[in-house]
Image (cartoon, rainbow, N blue to C red):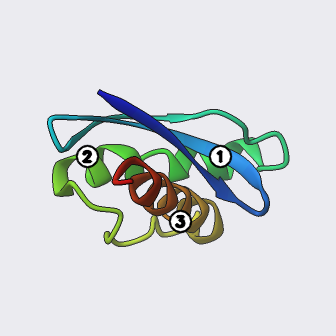
Amino acid sequence: MKMASGKARHRDLAEVTVEGGSITDISIVSAEKEDGAYLSMAEDIIPTIIDAQSADVDTISGATFSSTGIKNAVAQALEEAAK
């Protein structure tokens, strides 16, 4: 099992757990500057990323910036976990 963090807007945003080469969990670790309503909607992207096993998924309409931040943080964490 590997855990890696990804940054968005210069701060840790997501922690990704990879087991056996598969994404098994994504947690938001820091989002104090995110609007709670947008973040709540954006978190709907997490199961989509896990199902796709990739951060290359569509953003969440109505929470584009927040969901893009999560996607970017996950992509960065996956790169770190692959090392």
Nearer to us in this view, 50 or 59:
50
Within the image, what quadrant is residue 79 found in?
bottom left
Vertical arrangement, residue 19 with respect to residue 40, above or below: above
Q: Amino acid at mark 3?
A: Asn
Asked which secondary structure carries label 1, the reply is strand
Q: Which residue is mark 3?
A: 72
Q: Which residue is mark 1?
A: 13
- Residue 30 in picture, x, y percent from top left: 72, 37
Asked which secondary structure carries label 2, the reply is helix
Residue at 53% from the left image edge and 49% from the top image edge: 41
Q: Earlier in the sequence, mark 2 or mark 1?
A: 1
Taking the image as shown, residue 12 lies to the left or right of residue 14, namely right
Distance from the alpha carbon under mark 2 to that under mark 3? 14 Å
Residue at 55% from the left image edge and 68% from the top image edge: 68
Classify mark 1: residues with Cα within 10 Å, few (<14), some (14-19) or many (20+). many
Residue at 64% from the left image edge and 69% from the top image edge: 65
- Residue 53 in picture, x, y percent from top left: 21, 54
Q: Amino acid at mark 2?
A: Ile
Furthest toward the top, the residue is 1
Nearer to us in this view, 60 or 9:
9
Which circle marks residue 38 in the picture? Answer: none
- Residue 9 in picture, x, y percent from top left: 77, 63
Within the image, what quadrant is residue 57 found in?
bottom left
Q: Earlier in the sequence, mark 3 or mark 1?
A: 1
Asked which secondary structure carries label 3, the reply is helix
Q: Which residue is mark 2?
A: 50
Q: Amino acid at mark 1?
A: Leu
Residue at 58% from the left image edge and 63% from the top image edge: 63
- Residue 19 in picture, x, y percent from top left: 22, 32
